[in-house]
Amino acid sequence: MWFIGGKHVRGMTLLLVMASLAGVLSACAYTDDEAAPATASPPVPSRPAPPPPPTADPALAKEQASNQTQLDQLLGPRPSDLVLGSSGGLGGDGHRTSLPGIPEGRYKVTSACVGVTDAALLIAQPDRRGGSSHELALKCGTARSMTVNLEAGQVFAHLVPMTTEPGTAAVAGFWLVPAP
């Protein structure tokens, strides 16, 4: 009769008593009437705040606006039969735009740039077998045109500077219209 009055019964009893006391004590709640002591310094944030956005250089903005005005004069008014067209800054890696779908056909592309010496307009349909692309080299300050054959589907246009000269205020644009 090792289990009656033996070590195992006393150990089991002690375990049950402790478990019930733990449940009773955890139900008690104590409140502190005193305020928490103030810390000597405010807590440090886990990450520093991001830097403020860069402020626009008024001289650069004025030069880019002047270049855009010249570009608008070179390209002329927006065509009524415009399929795709865009203009924007050539800073960094240039200016991109796309159209999810165009009808198959011949198109006339007119493009110009202002603010650097050379740029290029790249027209691509990379979803075609082997991809199709057309490039129009530009001498900035004049408008150039070319006719391209495009398949039905998505078309991408990318205006890029073709020089290493600084051209942060340079702009370029193009019109894509059905060819006559």
Image (cartoon, rainbow, N blue to C red):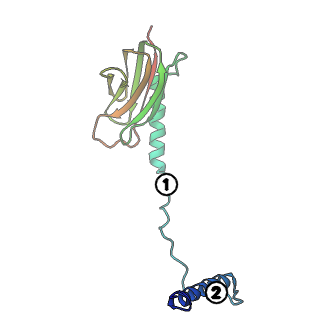
User: Which residue has dot 2 on it?
Assistant: 21
Instruction: From the viewer's perspective, tell me whether residue 29 is left or right of residue 55.
Output: right
Callout 2 crowding tier (Cα within 10 Å): few <14, some 14–19, many ≥20: few
Give percent across and percent down for residue 161: 33, 35
Marks 1/2 in contact by CB < 8 Å: the verdict is no
Looking at numbered disc 1 in the image, what kind of residue is underneath it?
Thr
Callout 1 crowding tier (Cα within 10 Å): few <14, some 14–19, many ≥20: few
Q: Quadrant of residue 170?
A: top left
For mark 1, give the secondary structure.
loop
Residues under labels 1 and 2: Cα distance? 66 Å
Residue at the image position 38 percent from the left and 43 percent from the top: 168
Looking at numbered disc 2 in the image, what kind of residue is underneath it?
Leu
The residue nearer to you, when weighing 14 against 173, is 14
Give percent across and percent down for residue 20: 64, 83
**Disc on the earlier residue, 1 or 2:** 2
The residue nearer to you, when weighing 100 against 141, is 100
